[in-house]
Amino acid sequence: MIAPRLPVIGWRTFAGAARVDQPSLLDHPRHRLTTSGRAAILLALECLAIGPGDLVLLPTYHCPTMVSPVKTLGADAVFYPIDEHGAPRLDWLSLHVPPRTRALLVPHYFGLPQPMEGVRAWCDAQGIALIEDCAHAMFGRAGARAIGTWGDVAVASLTKFFPTPEGGVLALNRAGLTLPSLAPASAIEQIKAASDILHMGASHDRLTGLNGLIRGAFALKSALRATLRGEPRTPPPPSSHGALDEADESHELDEIDANMALIDPRQSHRALTSASGWISTRVPRRRIVEARRRNYAFFTEAFSGRDGVHPLLPALPADCAPYVFPLWVRTPDPGYSEMRKLGVPVSRWDRLWPGVPALPGDAGKAWSHHVLQLACHQDLTDADLHRIVEQVERLFIAPAR
């Protein structure tokens, strides 16, 4: 059984306490649930009235889905360097910020909170809006404030933390900004979201007692559809849930144009389906946070002091829930491709937007090649975790002599 790359629903989803000590962006007093993290970025840019001729500062270490909303609105992206912890190089920005810059997007990479006091002060001094990208960080605090409350606007992704096929969050902190009105999902979209949630759980054997029934129903549906279309009756394998931007952040260069084309204005301005919204707001949270922290610690211990790899950021802050475990690999190729083919839940931001420059003091471009993002979510079993370690040891760690 292939380990899920993202959370999937199962009976354990509903176990544990509802609340945790860490604040969540879902508790933000001014937030709106969106169809995806990418849609949330697009809506955030629209709230800030960013459009043609405007510039948005983006990190050199990025997923193309950070860039495509900027391009979709006709604005231009300028890339800035990050330091060895993933924070913006404010010294470089102070010297090179273009005059038409309207916003700076700063991610909390891997779910580990970035220090935001200096970034907030820099944006205020420059008169630039701060977009706080919490796609990797649904829970926790950054310094004295809850994650998602430093930016003029904040965005997040639900699929990275909850077993939903879609979902994002847009939160507004600056007074005077108005949450957008979103069109309701259609009946077909509502049904599809609910069925996708169940299908992914059954595909990974997480709904004991219902797995066979659900898989059989979907196989029958695929066979009937193939018959009507005159196609072979071979059902497609279950896909990882979510749209391309949420489920698979390792893109080929020729997929970037398609990735941009996936930004559908109607979908970006559609409300989240009821099933996805219910899952993300009603499931207990303590298990999510505690399991992710436990899995992160497991990988830290497994890969510390090894030849060929090391934890990129071994110190896990006390007040956060990680999205993935970042592993620095000295020679990641061709092993990374083999891991992907084997279905190991790993990704890499190795396909940067065309034109990303080489900048002094930048860790971003090196991260894009050497840093593997290992899944550490709450729906990985102990066997899954050990299989991930075994594959890393086999492919990247030099044997002891």
Image (cartoon, rainbow, N blue to C red):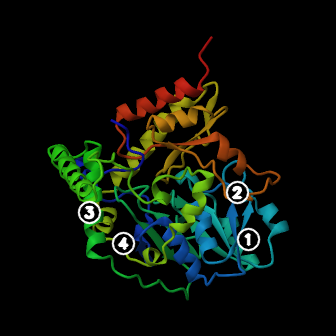
> What is the spatial separation of the Cα atoms under label 2 and label 4, in whole angstroms?
30 Å
Q: Judge the density around disc 3: few (<14), some (14-19), many (≥20) Cα neighbours within 10 Å.
A: some
- Which of the labelled discs sits on residue 60, or is there none? 2
Where is mark 4, residue-wise? 272
Where is mark 3, residue-wise? 194
Q: Is residue 84 left or right of residue 112?
A: right
Q: Amino acid at mark 4?
A: Leu
Q: Earlier in the sequence, mark 1 or mark 2?
A: 2
Q: Position of residue 226 (x, y in %)?
A: 26, 54
Q: Closer to the camera, 373 or 89?
A: 373
Q: Please say if the residues under marks 1 and 2 sit with CB atoms less than 8 Å apart.
A: no
Residue farthest top in this picture: 401
Secondary element under disc 3, as helix, strand or loop, is helix
Q: Earlier in the sequence, mark 4 or mark 3?
A: 3
- Which of the labelled discs sits on residue 122, or is there none? 1
Secondary element under disc 2, as helix, strand or loop, is loop
Please tell me which residue is depicted at 26% across the width and 47% down the height of the picture. 233
Q: Judge the density around disc 2: few (<14), some (14-19), many (≥20) Cα neighbours within 10 Å.
A: many
> What is the spatial separation of the Cα atoms under label 2 and label 3, in whole angstroms?
36 Å
> What is the spatial separation of the Cα atoms under label 1 and label 2, in whole angstroms?
19 Å
Q: Amino acid at mark 2?
A: Thr
